[in-house]
């Protein structure tokens, strides 16, 4: 194919189009003006103008997570790039494929502390999967395509392409994607068959097994979820998932134990603790999940399926490691399991389920209902009852409301739940909801928020209005940074140091000021009608749901404790945290 | 202390694409994840293919060493990582330039010891020598220790380079 000469800026646009990109999230500035000019002169790519670069990255994350496609961001040099850092770190921690293009000062000014110069590749090196500084437009086409390849293959993640302004003007030949093969990066997707066979042997012999699944199943694509469902049903084993993996297995299914970990259900955590076999699929034994590693699942053999070899034996030593993409590995595993005669012993499995039912009987997510004050759990329950469906996408901010959403909103499909799991970024949910709404214009997209978190990216209401995105912000307004208050109660003698949400805006008026709709609910009796009202509005809505200020999120594994040491409710006796535990976050 | 917790010293050879920032990536990985670097050397080894070889000596429990290796392999410009301590028998060498100043008895003694270490004199004044000494890191340690009371002024060490024994490439 004959190469076509064009400017660097045109190469950027052409490469995006050739990569199948139709939407990007960004914010202009001096160092990206040539790219903005090229954007202006074309029709194929839609640009969503955010109000803060952090929001551009989170919106791209929401877009990526709800579609399975990479999200694309365009920001200027210096402050544009540094504002994107939180989003990039968030995407790295949660393995979200993103391509972020940053402008840079012209090459001859690099290193001179020029206006709006920042060492963007230096700053973003630890918070990207990979990054590039493009020194010549001759390299630009290749780097653009490599960037998409790296972001989306293997364990997905964010990448940054830093493009000096002179390179955006420079003319060069464009290289089409099919002519680009990455030199070194070849992640393994097929699992080792011998390891898979060995895993199937263990599965067939298990007496107290549990599936422990994570975001890797969602990242692997819809077929991974289907294969997981088939395998779980075929084995009859119980299944739990991390915060990141919710939806890969339907919450409405009988084998589903609910989420595990710090605020996971009693049955999920106890099953992990007492299991004789853990089948980990696309999860990474993170500290929110394991609690005290020394006390973690002492008697279980562990099978770990992960596309990233560095996740294996990082926190927990496993018996069988299978490096590969979840869908590929599950497919092979399922085939080998089906062909094999041996099956787990029925009576042992029945006894295991009996035990699990006993744990379930504790009803660890139960709470004290109230007639005159809205309990936050009740609000999520009602929200779920009235909005649940295949065309509903839920995002969250970070705090108690996030955990209540994970516990009480039930997901039946992957890619419908988006929350900042690894980094725990307040301010994530609303822009992520905007990204999801852009990708699914007719869907119901709700950001379950806290009154503190929502203020971290509230300016995006303006974006939602501009692009006519009917995103719903459902604030569980407890007037506190509730999760901080809860920890202060648990660890610091109830001294509420700076965790009260003082001087809150009137959220209804705030919504109106932006041209959105504000709704407030203060009594349980009015909740359903007002939620229905919210759904009916075809505009952005802030729903200020005034809830019990002092409700805490349970059950909980206090930091430093093991799964078997969960506390189920507000019991001061039970809530003892060791000195070592206090050190942990 | 169980066997799991035992701290081991490992030498890793890392073949990388010699692109801008690759060394910063490797060093940043060690710094950011709290791994230890005892020695690190780097130079281009294949000009045509733009490949560099980094030799890094590190310490950690077996689990940490396995992590370091996996983390290095995960870096996009890394072609290959070989653990020269665990995977195969290998040879390690380091070179040092050692400046010793002194006159009379001490000067004579320094020169005499340098011969025992097969060190070469690469610079001489009436009152000083610069020795070039090559060997395993322990040999250099020993030589430097001996020179200390004899007027050691300066030491410059390359850090360890290593290669597997036998006919195969890395
Ligand atoms: C950017 C950022 N800063 C600080 C924190 C620490 N933090 C975690 S939860 C939380 C309180 C959140 O309050 P709110 O949004 O009202 O949620 P609630 O816990 O009350 O439901 C804070 C400050 C964080 N996660 N992210
Ligand atoms: Mg709050």
Image: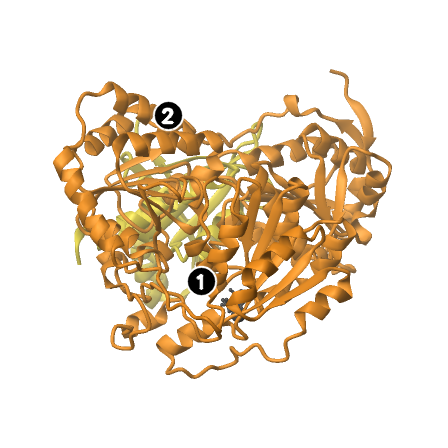
Say which of A566 and A29 sits in front: A566
Residue A504 quadrant: bottom right
Judge by depth and name the residue closer to the eye, A225 or A193.
A225
Whether residue A481 can be seen here = yes
Residue B154 or residue A222, whichever sits in front: A222
**Which residue is under mark 2?**
A331
The picture's colour for chain A is: orange
Pick the front one: A336 or B113: A336
Numbered disc total: 2
In the rendered structure, the colour chosen for chain B is yellow
- For mark 1, name the chain: A
Q: Which residue is mark 1?
A: A377
> Label 2: how many residues lie within 10 Å, few (<14), some (14-19) or many (20+)?
many
Asked if ligand 1 lies within 8 A of label 2, the reply is no
Taking the image as shown, residue A300 lies to the left or right of residue B122, namely left
A161 left or right of A453?
right
A477 w.r.t. A536: above or below: below
Q: Residue farthest to the top?
A: A1
């Amino acid at each position: 194919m004959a190469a076509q000469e064009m400017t660097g800026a045109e190469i950027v646009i052409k490469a995006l189009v050739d990569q199948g990109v139709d939407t990007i999230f960004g914010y202009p500035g001096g160092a990206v003006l040539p790219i903005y000019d090229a954007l202006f002169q074309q029709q194929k790519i839609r640009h969503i103008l955010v109000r803060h670069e952090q929001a551009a990255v989170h919106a791209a994350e929401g877009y990526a997570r709800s579609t399975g496609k990479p999200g694309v961001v365009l920001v200027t040099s210096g402050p544009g790039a540094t504002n994107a850092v939180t989003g990039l770190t968030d995407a790295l921690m949660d393995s979200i494929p993103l391509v972020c293009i940053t402008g840079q000062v012209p090459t001859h000014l690099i290193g001179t502390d020029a206006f709006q110069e920042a060492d963007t590749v230096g700053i973003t090196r630890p918070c990207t999967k990979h990054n590039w500084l493009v020194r010549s437009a001759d390299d630009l086409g290749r780097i653009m395509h490599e960037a998409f390849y790296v972001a989306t293959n293997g364990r997905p993640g964010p990448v940054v392409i830093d493009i000096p302004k002179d390179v955006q003007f420079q003319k060069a030949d464009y290289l089409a994607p099919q002519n680009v093969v990455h030199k070194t990066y070849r992640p393994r997707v097929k699992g080792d068959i011998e390891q898979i066979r060995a895993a199937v042997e263990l599965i067939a012999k298990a007496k107290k097994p549990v599936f422990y699944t994570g975001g890797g199943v969602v990242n692997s694509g819809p077929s991974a979820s289907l294969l997981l469902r088939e395998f779980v049903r075929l084995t009859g084993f119980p299944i739990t998932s991390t915060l990141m993996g919710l939806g890969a297995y339907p919450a409405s299914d009988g084998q589903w134990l609910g989420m595990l970990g710090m605020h996971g259900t009693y049955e999920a955590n106890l099953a992990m603790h007492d299991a004789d076999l853990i089948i980990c699929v696309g999860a990474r034994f993170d500290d929110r999940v394991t609690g005290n590693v020394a006390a973690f699942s002492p008697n279980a053999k562990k099978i770990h399926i992960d596309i990233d070899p560095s996740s294996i034996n990082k926190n927990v030593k496993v018996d069988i490691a299978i490096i590969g993409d979840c869908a590929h590995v599950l497919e092979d595993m399922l085939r080998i399991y089906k062909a094999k005669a041996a099956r787990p012993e029925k009576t042992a499995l029945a006894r295991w389920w009996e035990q699990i039912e006993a744990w379930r009987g504790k009803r660890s997510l139960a709470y004290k209902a109230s007639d005159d004050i809205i309990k936050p759990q009740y609000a999520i329950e009602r929200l779920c009852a009235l909005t649940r469906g295949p065309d509903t996408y839920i995002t969250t901010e970070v705090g108690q409301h996030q955990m209540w959403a994970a516990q009480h909103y039930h997901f039946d499909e992957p890619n419908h739940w988006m929350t900042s799991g690894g980094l725990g970024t307040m301010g994530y949910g609303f822009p992520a909801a905007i990204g999801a709404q852009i990708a699914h214009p007719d869907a119901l997209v709700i950001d379950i928020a806290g009154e503190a978190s929502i203020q971290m990216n509230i300016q995006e209401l303006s974006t939602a209005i501009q692009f006519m995105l009917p995103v719903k912000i459902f604030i569980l307004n407890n007037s506190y940074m509730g999760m901080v208050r809860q920890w202060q109660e648990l660890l610091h003698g109830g001294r509420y140091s700076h965790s009260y949400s003082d001087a809150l805006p009137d959220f209804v008026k705030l919504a109106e000021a932006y041209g959105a709709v504000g709704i407030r609910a203060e009594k349980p009796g009015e909740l359903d009608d007002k939620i229905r009202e919210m759904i009916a509005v075809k505009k952005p809505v802030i729903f200020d749901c005034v809830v019990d200020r002092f409700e805490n999120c349970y059950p909980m594994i206090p930091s430093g404790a093991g799964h078997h040491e969960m506390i189920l409710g507000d019991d001061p006796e039970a809530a003892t945290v060791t000195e070592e535990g206090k050190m942990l976050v | 202390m169980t066997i799991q917790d035992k701290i081991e010293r490992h030498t890793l050879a890392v073949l990388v694409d010699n692109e801008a920032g690759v060394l910063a990536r490797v060093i940043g990985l060690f710094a950011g994840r709290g791994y230890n670097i005892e020695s690190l050397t780097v130079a281009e080894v294949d000009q045509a293919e733009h490949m560099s070889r980094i030799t890094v000596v590190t310490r950690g429990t077996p689990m940490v060493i396995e992590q370091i290796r996996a983390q290095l392999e995960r870096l996009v410009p890394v072609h290959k990582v070989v653990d020269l301590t665990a995977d195969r028998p290998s040879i390690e060498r380091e070179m040092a330039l050692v400046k010793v100043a002194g006159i009379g008895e001490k000067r004579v003694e320094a020169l005499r010891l340098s011969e025992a270490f097969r060190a070469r004199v690469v610079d001489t004044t009436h009152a000083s020598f610069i020795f070039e000494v090559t060997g395993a890191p322990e040999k250099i340690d020993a030589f430097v220790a001996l020179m200390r009371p004899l007027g050691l002024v300066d030491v410059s060490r390359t850090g360890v380079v290593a290669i597997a024994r036998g006919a195969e490439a890395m």
